[in-house]
Amino acid sequence: MMRTFMRLLTRRSLPDEELPTPDLSRIFPELRRSEPEGNDTAADKDAAEPEASGNDEPANLPAAETGSPEMNGDDIPGPLEPAEFSDWLAGDLEQMRENFHALRDLPTSPRRIRALFLSAHNLRGTAEPYGYPIIGRICTSLCRLLEDIEDAEPDLALINLHVEASSAAARTGGAAASEELADTVCRSLEEKVDLRAARR
């Protein structure tokens, strides 16, 4: 059942044009087939963007890092309702996907690595309290992978597996029926990250 996905986990990095988009519906059975996603062209626009030499921070940095005014007590939002969180989760997963596509176009860009790291970091901190522990675990693994990149070129195939697995887990609605399989996926991703870190 997991043969295809496990083969992908054991592969080495692939050229950008060969990056797989695994069908994780076999690992997360609750996934309902939806309309195929269109090709994201946002990264194409960003690919021609010159890298800034003095300010290499992504546009989506938190207010504290961009110098924006701090929120006062009245501006701080309360806990999200489940429906609100679902919308937020979908938006953050899409942002993470766009940041990955941008990194794929320019893999050595510290700015784009940082942007993808921030997307994963945001998700790992909030997914578990709202009933998506698998997403939190996957994004924790992705953050560790991105932290270990340093000056090396990132493993785009492994990053892609993290991004796709997060989206697949979200589409299950946090269901526990696939917990054992999802745990196997997470452990496989974590072991792959461990192996990469050990080689450095």
Image (cartoon, rainbow, N blue to C red):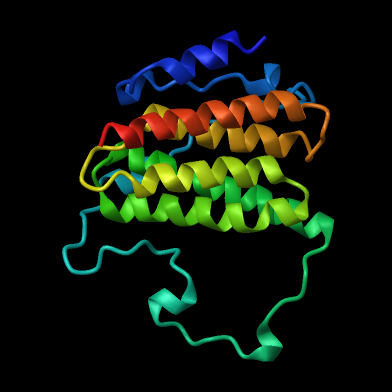
Residue 192 sits in which quadrant? top left
Q: Position of residue 59 (x, y in %)?
A: 40, 64
**Residue at image x 64%, y 43%?**
135
**Residue at image x 57%, y 40%?**
138
**Furthest residue toward front:** 198
Q: Nearer the viewer, residue 191 or 31?
A: 191
Q: Is residue 42 above or below residue 18?
A: below
Q: Image check: 2 left or right of 83? A: left
Residue 75 sits in which quadrant? bottom right
Location of the N terminus (image quadrant): top right
Q: Position of residue 43 (x, y in %)?
A: 39, 43
Q: Nearer the viewer, residue 32 or 138?
A: 138
In this view of the protein, can residue 135 be seen by the observer? yes
Q: Nearer the viewer, residue 99 or 158?
A: 158
Q: Is residue 179 above or below residue 150?
A: above
**Residue at image x 43%, y 39%?**
41
Residue 175 sits in which quadrant? top right
